[in-house]
Image: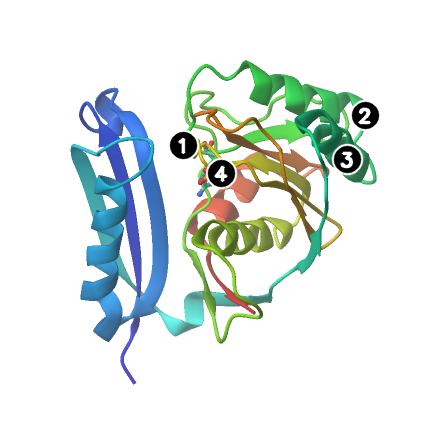
């Protein structure tokens, strides 16, 4: 059997991210060696053709994954919600989150995302009880990485939803994280979600069409060292079973 590889792409405009370039697109997969070249081509295409702009810096990083380092987790359940306005969607998201997160922290999450003047590459970590921000690098946040899905997809879904479900499943599998709030930075994609209690709540109209800023918040509820949580999110290889 051929081995698996992790392949990760990040693209920016105006130079590399670390030299102040604007983040355009990031994506990753875990694939068989025989699929690496075609997946690399599709990731380059994404960096060049994104609705947020054209990357003039593209970084692709590939490394082998060892079978014994892979954690398998089952995909979380999906619930589809309906809503007619951004206000209605935010109220619904707040209600859902309040089953696991303190009211104050939920409000703080919406304030933080509402105040973003540009896109972060990662997520904001908030204390689920107090709403205090826990991540160290406020410009970057915590970027979840080393994940993909395996097996046959449970239902047809667009690439946004596939990636969000994989990410949300990994985040829900992290001991210490009780909830997540997200809406996309893709100006054309207004669907967002809340993940909590092992359910991905897919919510339309989480932002106005055309808005180029999105974000993510992870709510942390136990007394576990933040560096362990961040290490799991960034470095543990997780394959999500559909
Ligand atoms: P997206 O759903 O890809 O449009 O991303 C929406 C927002 O979520 C981005 O602006 C980032 O702040 C954050 N984000 C995107 N990818 C990740 C990731 N892999 N880990 C953590 N946060 C992310």
Q: Where is residue 101 in the image (x, y as percent from the top left)?
A: 77, 34
Residue at image mark 4: 189
Q: Residue 103 carries which label?
A: 2
Q: Give the Cα separation between the discs numbered 1 and 2.
A: 26 Å
Q: Does the residue labelled 1 lie within 8 Å of ligand 1?
A: yes
Q: What element carries label 3?
A: helix
Q: Which of marks 4 and 1 is nearer the N terminus?
A: 1
The residue at 57%/70% (across/down) is 154
Q: Position of residue 222 (x, y in %)?
A: 72, 39
Q: Is 172 placed above or below 26 here?
A: below
Q: Is 62 placed above or below 140 here?
A: below
- The answer to which of 63 and 42 lies nearer the viewer is 42
Q: Give the Cα separation between the discs numbered 2 and 4.
A: 27 Å
Q: Position of residue 159 (x, y in %)?
A: 44, 54
Q: In which quarter of the image is the N terminus?
A: bottom left
Q: Which of marks 2 and 4 is nearer the N terminus?
A: 2
Q: Is mark 3 within 8 Å of ligand 1?
A: no
Q: What element carries label 4?
A: loop
The reply to whether the C-beta atoms of the residues labelled 1 and 2 are less than 8 Å apart is: no
The residue at 44%/45% (across/down) is 234
Q: Earlier in the sequence, mark 3 or mark 1?
A: 3
Badge 4, how many Cα within 10 Å: few under 14, some, many 20+?
Answer: many
Residue at image mark 1: 121
Q: Is mark 1 on a helix, strand or loop?
A: loop
Q: Position of residue 91 (x, y in %)?
A: 77, 29
């Amino acid at each position: 059997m051929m081995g698996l590889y992790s392949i990760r792409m990040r693209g920016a405009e105006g130079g590399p991210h670390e030299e102040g370039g604007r983040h355009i697109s990031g994506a990753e997969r875990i694939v068989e060696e025989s699929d690496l070249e075609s997946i690399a081509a599709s990731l380059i295409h994404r960096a060049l053709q994104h609705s947020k702009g054209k990357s003039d810096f593209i970084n692709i990083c590939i490394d082998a994954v060892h079978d014994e380092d892979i954690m398998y987790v089952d995909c979380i359940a999906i619930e589809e919600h309906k809503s007619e306005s951004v206000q209605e969607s935010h109220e619904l998201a707040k209600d859902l989150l309040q089953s696991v997160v303190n009211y104050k922290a939920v409000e703080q999450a919406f304030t933080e995302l509402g105040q973003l003047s540009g896109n972060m590459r990662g997520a904001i970590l908030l204390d689920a009880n107090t709403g205090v921000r826990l991540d160290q690098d406020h410009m970057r946040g915590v970027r979840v990485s080393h994940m993909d899905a395996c097996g046959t997809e449970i239902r047809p879904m667009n690439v946004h939803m596939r990636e969000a479900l994989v990410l949300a499943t990994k985040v829900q599998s992290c001991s210490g994280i009780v909830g997540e709030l997200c809406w996309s930075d893709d100006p054309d994609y207004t669907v967002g979600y809340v993940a909590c209690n092992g359910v991905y709540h897919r919510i339309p109209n989480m932002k106005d069409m055309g808005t180029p800023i999105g974000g993510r918040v992870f709510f942390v509820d136990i007394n576990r060292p933040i560096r362990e949580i961040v290490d799991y999110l960034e470095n543990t290889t997780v394959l999500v079973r559909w």
